[in-house]
Image (cartoon, rainbow, N blue to C red):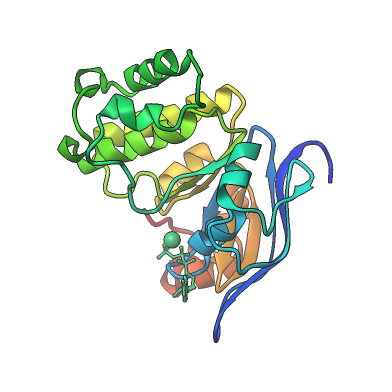
Amino acid sequence: MVDDIILETRGLRRDFGGVQALRGVNLQVHRTSITGLIGPNGSGKTTLFQVVSGMDRGGNGKVLFNDQPILGLRPWQIYRLGLARTFQLSRVFPGLTVLQNLLVAGRPGDRGARKRALGLIGRVKLCEHVNALGSELSYGQQRLVEFLRVLMCNPALILLDEPAAGVNPTLRHILWELVRHINGLGTSVLIIEHNMNVIADLCDPVYVLNEGEIIAQGDFDTVRADPRVLEAYFGRTQRSGGTTS
Ligand SMILES: Nc1ncnc2c1ncn2[C@@H]1O[C@H](COP(=O)(O)OP(=O)(O)OP(=O)(O)O)[C@@H](O)[C@H]1O
Ligand SMILES: [Mg+2]
């Protein structure tokens, strides 16, 4: 694998009984890229994240992170290597404050953790909520806090599963700015997102999954013009090249 690639899957498969959720997926995430992963509902996007992050250990094939095979490792081992993820549904500790929610993810004995946490909270304009409980936050705020918690360990690669789903436009804007910011600092990002405007704006390259297979990859304009994508993802009615959002 060339040095430029931080994550690679080769022939990745995941079968759930009769359902072949991943059918030999080959995907590469270039270091410092924001790579998009799109596809219709049920196409296998979240399953890919589950297998790559070690949450689902039933996959077959190869997953290389920084050249190291990670399939079969446990989630915490993969996390420690620098590969972190968020979930499609928010997971914030309801009984902990915003600051505590971040500090639980800091490395033990890390004296800089508090400063880093407060810096992140300030960046997403949640300063006035620093002592609010997770349960007191709006859903969008919870998603931001979950994202910040993952950033506490300064991951080399972060997998984001529909991070803006259910988040209001103001917080969404803050969220996308944060993605750009961390990417500018050197964190690679692989992101599942349904909003094509966001994908077009943020991601290069984009991979398209359909029924467990990558059917197209490249920059957004290339991918959106691919007949297989128009048929499988955008639908037959949009053959003229319209976007969905
Ligand atoms: N734990 C599981 N057991 C059985 N089938 C599963 C399991 N997880 C996922 N599947 C199936 O695998 C397929 C892919 O699901 P997955 O959640 O990965 O899709 P997705 O692309 O993330 O969809 P969405 O856009 O709706 O989030 C679906 O057919 C789903 O029903
Ligand atoms: Mg999903």
Q: Quadrant of residue 178?
A: top left
Residue most toward the bottom?
A: 18
Residue 82 can be seen in this image: no
Residue most toward the left?
A: 136
Question: Residue at the spot x=28%, y=21% of the render?
Answer: 125
Residue 37 can be seen in this image: yes
- Judged left or right of residue 159, residue 196 is left
Question: Residue at the spot x=62%, y=45% of the render?
Answer: 77
Nearer to the camera, 55 or 171: 55
Q: Position of residue 20 (x, y in %)?
A: 58, 78
Nearer to the camera, 120 or 78: 78
Residue most toward the right?
A: 2
Vertical comparison of 64 with 120: above or below: below
Q: Position of residue 227 (x, y in %)?
A: 59, 68
Question: Residue at the spot x=48%, y=13% of the render?
Answer: 112
- Judged left or right of residue 20, residue 194 is left
Question: Residue at the spot x=84%, y=46% of the render?
Answer: 1
Vertical comparison of 175 with 219: above or below: above
